Image (cartoon, rainbow, N blue to C red):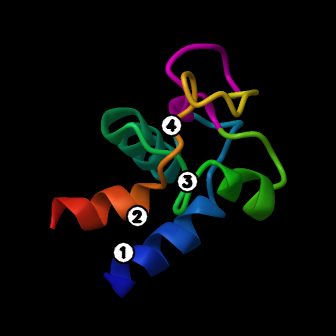
Amino acid sequence: DSIINDWMKDTLQQYNFDDPTDANTQVWDTMQTSMHCCGRRGFIDWSTVLQTPPPMSCCEEGDHICKTTNPRVIHTRGCLALHRDMD
């Protein structure tokens, strides 16, 4: 569990909004889209870690950046919690 936590913590900081083909960015986008999660602990990670709104993979619909905190649109659960639920 700590390995996954550390991996999420490190790779979230490397997310590249300017290069959607970046392998790290693709992993996060795929994970957030398929698991309906956002960030490591929640969507707030994006503003605290990268000082930016979450990427579109955190939202059900929209453009490049997810500019909402509406729980009907944004994935509110963090990916780490969902990963723990799968074990």
Rate crowding at label 4 as few (under 14), some (14 to 19) or many (20 or more) other CA atoms within 10 Å: many
Q: CA distance from mark 1 to mark 3?
A: 13 Å
Which residue carries the number 4 mark?
75
Mark seen at residue 80: 2
- Depth check: 75 or 62 in front? 75
Which residue carries the number 3 mark?
39
Image: magenta residue range: 55-65
Q: Nearer the viewer, mark 1 or mark 4?
A: 4
Amino acid under label 1? Ile
Residue 55: x percent and y percent?
Answer: 63, 35
Q: CA distance from mark 4 to mark 3?
A: 9 Å
**Callout 3 secondary element:** loop
Residue 3 placement, left or right of 45: left
The residue at the point 56 percent across, 73 percent down is: 10
Q: Which one is earlier in the sequence, the residue at label 4 or at label 2?
A: 4
Which residue carries the number 1 mark?
4
Marks 1 and 2 close (CB-CB < 8 Å): yes
For the C terminus, give its image quadrant. bottom left
Residue 78 placement, left or right of 1: right
71 w.r.t. 79: above or below: above
